[in-house]
Image (tube, rainbow, N blue to C red):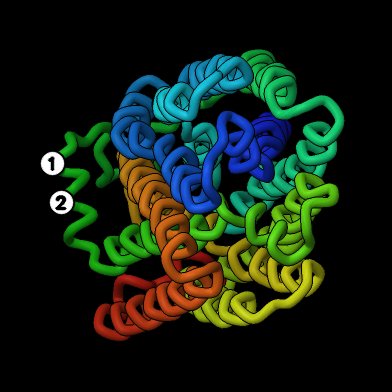
Amino acid sequence: MWFANFFIAGSITMVLPFLSLYIDQLGDFTDSFVQTWSGWIFGITFVTAFIFSPIWGRIGDRYGRKNILIMSAVGLAVSVLLMGFVATVWQLFLLRLFMGIFTGFIPMSQALISTQTPKETAGQVLGTLQTGSITGSLLGPMLGGWIADHIGYATTFQLVSITVALSAVIVFLGISEERVEKEGVNEKTSYNSKEVLSHILTHPVLLIVMVISLFVQVAHFSIQPILSLFVGNLHGPENLALFSGIAFSAAGLGNLLMAKRWGRLSDRKGYIKILIFLLFMAGIVYLPAAFVTNIWQLVILRFLLGISIGGIIPVRTAYIRQEAPLAMQGEVLGYNTSLRFLGNIIGPAMGGLLSGAFGFSAVFFVTSTLLISCGFLLLITKQRHPKSVTQTASY
């Protein structure tokens, strides 16, 4: 699963550094038009992903997750292949919308591994799994930028579709899913959607963790679609795709170095404690990016951001693993993924609109405030409901 995530993340992130540049190439557009449509085209994928994630999660709980992962990889490969042949912004927009049906490979892989993992080591195992997608995300933007500079944007899309399809082959040949229906005598082997929603709503810390998933994605993705434009503003047009890839990958490097360590630490110290710390750290690190004057200052801050963001996903997933009965975990993680995708919709659109209206610095100010506010919200909820953060692992 680590290798499948590596190829999916590496392939998809190969096209991110030049997505806005690809849009600019499709016509004679103003800078404001390109910035705004970069946000919408980046984020529209997650509209359909938002709708389909709980559905895939529920199907996975009932019938297993291996076949869903194969379908997801094939659907992504076809979508990316067709993007290399578009002639208008609207065609790219509609293909990104279609792609969202199959987006969610990595969260579904986390659900698969989560159900195969004991609760007391979930943080470390999920952190280790995440290093696969992080390594891909680290190499993808730089490699994609270099390839795009040499063979063109459209051909790069077509090439990427092949490596996405490779993940489907890896899952088909390399994964044997063991069905585990329950872990305790009081657990049921199946839950309806009403019971799943009731469980979430009656566990306040779990509910807030899932809501924070939305805001973390809004914050993290607000800068993604306009990052290459920001890099161009700092560095100039020379080798722009390559330097955009370096800026993207800097966060991936920090993420790679710390994801497993944050997971292991949270298994010992408590998932909620670590989540609160990471939210404050990410908010503080984001703010100085509004004042950078050269590309390397931005790269350093992106690296520090990756260190903080690196622990949020595995620690959050491990907490859900602890709080949700096994037979409903896929659907609960599906709702969590759906909220993340909603954040992926709002974030790019917000970033594009803010940068178009007020400049790039406004995006960093708003993002920093949002992350710090999430840290305070989780801290207050933890203090009000201390029984909801009891750690099942041994200390």
The percent position of residue 35, horizontal first and vertical second, equals 51, 51
Q: Is residue 89 visible?
A: yes
From the viewer's side, name the closer residue of 171 and 23.
23
Q: Nearer the viewer, residue 23 or 282?
A: 23
Q: Are marks 1 and 2 in contact (CB under 8 Å)?
A: yes
Q: Amino acid at mark 1?
A: Lys
Q: Which numbered marker is on residue 122?
A: none
In the rendered image, which quarter contains the C terminus?
A: bottom right
Query: What numbered label is drawn on residue 198?
Result: 2
139 and 360: which one is in front? Answer: 360
Residue plotted at (31% across, 84% down)? 380
Task: Classify mark 2: helix, strand or loop.
Answer: helix
**Res 358 quadrant in image:** bottom left
Name above or below for residue 150 compared with residue 246: above
Seen at 82% across and 25% down, the residue is 151
Between 289 and 27, the one lying in front of the other is 27
Q: Position of residue 160 (x, y in %)?
A: 70, 24
Q: What's under tag 2, amino acid-wise? A: Ser
Q: Would residue 238 be found to the left or right of residue 71 on screen?
A: right
The image's mark for residue 194 is 1
Element carrying mark 1: helix
